[in-house]
Structures are given as C-alpha cells and as structure tokens.
Image (tube, rainbow, N blue to C red):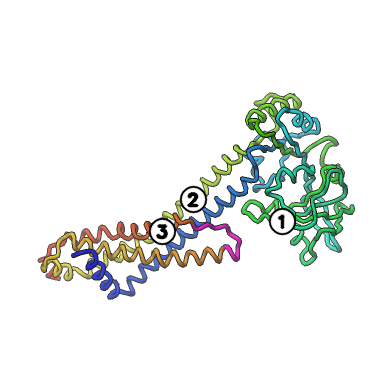
Amino acid sequence: MNIIDVMIYGLKNLSNRSMRSWLTIIGMVIGVIAIVVILSISEGFNKDILDQMSSFGADQMIIFPISDITQALSGGGSIASPQTSGKLFQEDADDVENIPGVKNVVRSIFGRATLSFKDKNITATIIGVDRNMFDMYDNYIEVESGRIFKDGERNVAFFAADAATEYFGNDKIESGSVIKLNGKNYRVVGIQKKIGTSLSQTDDSSIYIPFEDAKDLFTDQFLDDEVGYMMVQIDEGFDADEIKEKIEIKLADNHHVRLDDKDFSVITSEQISEIVGTVLLSVQLVLAAVTLIASVVGAIGIANTMFMNVLERVREIGILKSVGARRNDILKIFLVESAMIGFAGGIIGLILGYIALELLVEFFGVPAFLRLRIIAFVFIFSVGTGVLAGFIPAWRAAKMDPVDALKF
C-alpha cells in the first residue's frame, strides 16, 4: 500500500469512529492551545522586557545606597523602588561627576506625599530628579502634552500617563492643572506618553518634580545633603567597567569603608541584563514544564484511542494480512491514523490558540508574540505526539498473527 492509499483508508476508519476520534482530537486541541498561549506569552514578555531594557543603554549605570544588587533591583522594574541600606550624599554626586569619562550624573530622591487635586486627596509616591534625567532617557520617557520642567524651575510637576488619568477618577490631570503636594501648590507643566510595557507599570504611574523641590518636600525624610540614588551616563569611548571601578573606589573612600564592605552598589546595564535574563530563564523553565504536561495529556489521549482501535479491529487486521498486507502496511495504517489525529488537533488548536491570545491581549493587556517558530513547533509537536503515542499500539497490531486475528 502506498501512502495515499494508507491516508484514504485511515480517513475512512476515523470517520467511522467519528465520536471517539473527535474526543481524542479535542484532548489534543486543549494541549495545543496551552502550548500556543504559553509559548506566545513567554515570547511576548521576553520581547517586551528586552525592548524596555534597550532604553537603559550600555553607557548608563545606577548607584544605589545598598550593597545587595539583587535587592536593589527587586522593586518591580522601576528605578524608583525605595531601598534603605546606606546613604548617598551630595559630595558623592560631585565626586562621581568629576571622574574622567563621566558625562552626566542625575540625582534623585523619592517619598510619599499627600497629593490633592480639586476636592480629592490621595497619598502618592513623588520622585524628585534633576532635569537631565529626561535627556538621558529620552528614548523611554516621551512627552504626550506640555513639556518637561526646565533647569532651575520650581514648584512644577511632570505626570506620567496613568498618574494623570487614573489617580483621581473622572477628574483628569492635564498640562496647566494645579495640584497640591503636602498642601503646597504645584503647576503641572507636562504629561508623559504612556510607555505600556510589561515592566513599566510603576514608571507609567510616576510623578516627577525638580530635585530641589523634592528636598524641601521630604525634608523630614532625608538629611540636608542626602541623595536617594544616582543615575550616571558615561562619555562615548570610555569603558563602563573601568568607570564603575573608579566610582566604587571613590565612593568607598568617601564612606570610609573597604570595597568588600561597601554600603552602595554601582549597577551597569550588562549586570541588569544578566539578572533579567536569569529571571526570564526561570520563568521559561516553568512554562516549559507546563507545556510538557500539556503534551503528555494529549499523547495519553491518542495512545488510548489507538489501543482501543487495535482491540476493536483485530479481525480487520487479520483480513488485511490474509489478502497480502505486510507488517509494515499495518504499521503505517495505524501510525498515519494517529498522525492525522495529531495534525487535526494541531490545526484546530493553533486557530483557537490564536483567538485566545487576541482576547488576552485585548482584555488583559498581556504581551504576546506568536513567532513563526512557535507555529512550526506546534505542527511538529502535534504530529510527532500522534506518531509516538500511536507507535506501540501500531506495532502491536502489526505483530498480530493473521490466523489468530481471524478467530475474533
């Protein structure tokens, strides 16, 4: 029997047992949907995070007042996550700025304050930064309306998109609005364009004011010359690791500590990428385990159906062998049938998986990216699972003695 004859014969057999075949296909479909959704969301998060990480260029680093890098990065992806182990001071900022190869130093402090607009009051995190921060991250922070505050400007604020639209319900903050921070008037000079990535929830809800305003606002939370953390940009042509080493030596000298006992961290973009990569790998391993479970469920369903097919078609197998069908022909018949079940499950599962992804993206904002390699994997997986799951029952059918089979 050639492959075309085998396929036609297999389709007839599956149609004769349509109820069982469809139940098996449905089991395969569920597994494929799980694979499509899981892998696409994993790819989406991976792409989303890498795109956002690209805004933190190789020429940038952050200095946190804490010795543990992992803890310094545990605030959900925002550079404004508070840490309390150690302190940085204006002297540190001045000395870092004077290191050859350092182009910019951005000071920042942050804290909680009472934010009032019209007749409503909330408590919000307020971030005080130097104006040049917006130049350093101009490919990440963009203006939707208005402008960014200027150097030396006081009692002004720049709102991120979600902070402007969600903090006060139907009362939206716009450029020109007047708010109160701890009872003091501030004019909103601009609104930031929504970033909208998987790691930007905090940055999309930020409220920025000039560094000097923040010093006055949080005078009871920080020392007079204290800096919360610093963002550093190095000049083109300088090595980030060498600059990092010089910064660490200078700050350790300022803080009168050894490098092994330093109470600060200088984190480069390469280190951040490594840490994020480790986290992504852990997530992907978990998703891979879920995908494996889905494949096992689909394989068990196909194997069960094919075993039942063999038991019900013993006499048919005997007749086929008696009229000249060889062992390989019988093997091909059952393998092709199981492969067809897997293929049908793959096609339907892919379509329904794509629809599920569209719904997740639309209603929950989940990042998803259906790559061509995922589609190819689905077909290889579904057909391969069908063939592997059907091999043992097919081999069992092929080995049957025609005389014994005809007795059934």
> Most prominent secondary structure in the magenta stretch?
loop
Q: Quadrant of residue 367?
A: bottom right
Looking at the image, is mark 3 or mark 2 earlier in the sequence? 2
Residue at mark 3 to residue at mark 1: CA–CA distance: 38 Å
Question: Does 386 sit left or right of 317 as displayed?
Answer: right
Residue at mark 3 to residue at mark 2: CA–CA distance: 19 Å
Q: Where 344 sits versus 155, above or below? A: below
In the rendering, which numbered label is found on residue 360? none
Looking at the image, is mark 3 or mark 1 earlier in the sequence? 1
Q: Quadrant of the C terminus?
A: bottom left
**Is residue 146 within the magenta segment?**
no
Q: Position of residue 143 (x, y in %)?
A: 74, 54
Question: Does 96 sit left or right of 29 as displayed?
Answer: right
In the rendering, which numbered label is found on residue 286? 2
- Give SS at disc 2: helix
Q: Position of residue 393 (x, y in %)?
A: 25, 61
Which residue, as the protein is rendered here, is positioned at the far front? Answer: 237
Q: Where 268 sits versus 339, above or below? A: above
Depth order, front residue of 250/293: 250
- Residue bearing mark 3: 378
Residue displayed at 35% across by 67% down: 24
Q: Position of residue 365 (x, y in %)?
A: 61, 61
